[in-house]
Amino acid sequence: MTEFGEDFGLVGSDEADLDSGFSHAAKVGDWLVFFNGFRHSSTLTRFSMNSLRCCALVASSLFFLTISAFSQTKKSDSGSKKPLETARTLRVVQGDVGRWPGNCRRCAMEAKSWEPVNGTCYYPVDMETKPGRYPISRRTTGGKLESASLLVSEKTFPEENFKNFKKPEYVNVSAKNLSRNKAELARVLPLLNASREERPAVFDLPLGKPAATLPNPENNFGAHRSFDGQERDRHTGDDYPLGAGQSVLSVGNGRVLLAENHFFSGNSVFIDHGNGLISEYFHLKDLDVKKNQTLKKGQKIGEVGETGRTTGPHLHLGLRWHGARIRPGLLLIDPSELPMVQP
């Protein structure tokens, strides 16, 4: 209650002002008692009686002027109070990445936290994150804790329906291949989860291109897919229309988590770049790397192919950052183009 009083001028010197005002009232009363006690005294002249009346009226007027001025001062002080500071907000859509630049030491979103990249906090949002408001924060190098709201908006993702798919074994999947896929997931998922553990970043932003000449993607990240009318899992990366045999390059320094052939994704490479970032390359013609191999940015990892469930040669590039499946092209551009926390 002390702070409330101080903010609204209810404690301290203002109480003395009020006491002073009421003291004036007491003095006016004393004058009136004095005047009434002696108004009929024969020793008072008409002149002294008039003088007393004048003094009483002057004192009374001064009292009411003091109270009026005090009231106006409080109204003025109240009207001059500054409005509350607007909360910081970071606005993104599903599958995007936002940033909070400037002297960051630690970043957090809800219950998870991680290190910044080159002094900037990045907040990746999974493509299936429910639209709404989420708490984020950062600790600066000076030790200051700052908070903001991450406002996630819904994104309209494309629909893809592949008719008369030329590889029917990927539409009506046999029990044998379903069992194979289950075993492959059992190897991949623990690696993806383990990559979320705290490890320093060995990459810089923007990431390198996965090919020497990179065309625009087909913009099918997050697409809802069906094959001959049968719904399948959503597309977690972007497809780049590269010709068969073109070299595929690592987008950054890192370590190979896995390099093997999978039923749906064909020849696949998963690379851990630290700070919870994993890059994925699917449908390769061949594999030029092996598990646990250390890579440099731009190093060749294979060639474009059409292995697995494909309609033709292309490169599938996927990115997962702190467990969030994000649009890969966002980390291939200048970070300054990403949405930023606004005051």
Image (cartoon, rainbow, N blue to C red):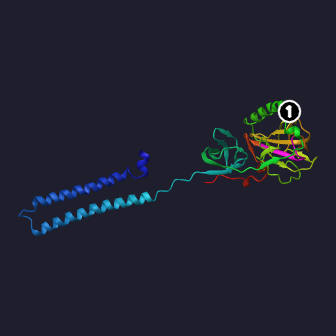
Count of numbered circles in the view:
1
| Residue 100 seen anywhere in this rendered image of the structure | no
Three-letter residue code for mark 1: Ser
Estimate the x, y position of residue 242 in percent, counting from the top left. 89, 50
Q: For mark 1, what is the residue?
A: 174
Q: Looking at the image, which residue sits at the far bottom?
A: 47
Quadrant assignment for the N terminus: top left
- Secondary structure beneath label 1: loop
Estimate the x, y position of residue 113 in percent, counting from the top left. 67, 39
Where residue 78 sits, quadrant-wise, is bottom left
Callout 1 environment at 10 Å: few (<14), some (14 to 19), or many (20+)? few
Q: Residue at x 21, y 59 (%)?
A: 28
Q: Looking at the image, which residue sits at the far left?
A: 42
* Most foreground residue, 16 or 206: 206
Estimate the x, y position of residue 254 in percent, counting from the top left. 82, 40
Where residue 117 sits, quadrant-wise, is top right
Q: Is residue 145 above or below residue 178?
A: below
Estimate the x, y position of residue 90 in percent, counting from the top left. 65, 50
Q: Residue at x 83, y 38 (%)?
A: 270
| Residue 258 seen anywhere in this rendered image of the structure | yes
Magenta residue span: 309-319
Position of 119 with respect to 71 (left or right) is right
Q: Residue at x 50, y 56 (%)?
A: 83
Quadrant assignment for the C terminus: bottom right
Position of 343 with respect to 292 (left or right) is left
Is residue 82 shown in magenta?
A: no
Q: Looking at the image, which residue sits at the far right?
A: 245
* Most foreground residue, 282 or 172: 172
